[in-house]
Image (tube, grey):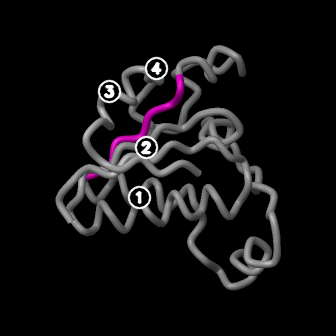
Amino acid sequence: MSERLSLLCVSGTREKIQMAAMAAATAAAGGSEVLVFLSMNALGYFVLGDQRKAPAEGEIGELMEQKNVPPFRRLFEQAKDLGGAQLYACSMALDVLGIDEGQLEPYIDGPMGLTRFLSDASGGPILVF
């Protein structure tokens, strides 16, 4: 892999955030640039110290925890550590939720607007979760 993979994460459910994190980590491990945009219901899970578990949509979501599948936060952090991933928080969602940039997990690169994300993501695939 060598092109950029862009992920738009808006869901707050375990399966969707987990799949986005798995895609990010796998693409980063394969040498691709990865751009992640965290917004809407997904963003709250990336506030410093947030330990909530995202609600499962179904059986797979429940089984992932029982089977000790690496949690999505760890996978996103690994994608960052592998050197190819950039993770951004939606500036509008930060405002709506009343979250300051300094309250985000340290592996989040900061705020970004949707217009900038779409511009940076142009020319490659955008996956929505």
Could you say whether the residue bearing mark 2 is in a helix, strand or loop?
strand
Q: Give yes or no for residue 89 being in the magenta stretch.
A: yes
- Given this view, does label 3 or label 2 mark the residue nearer the observer? 3
The residue that mark 1 highlights is 24
Q: Are marks 4 and 2 in contact (CB under 8 Å)?
A: no
Position of 58 compared to 88: left or right? right
**Residue 111: where, in percent of width, then height?**
46, 23
Give residue 36's mark: 2
- Which region of the structure is painted magenta? 84-90
Q: Quadrant of residue 77?
A: bottom left
Could you say whether the residue bearing mark 1 is in a helix, strand or loop?
helix
Q: CA distance from mark 3 to mark 1?
A: 19 Å
Give residue 117's mark: none
Q: CA distance from mark 3 to mark 2?
A: 13 Å
Q: Identify the amino acid type marked 1.
A: Ala
The residue that mark 4 highlights is 113
Residue at point 48% right, 66% down? Answer: 22
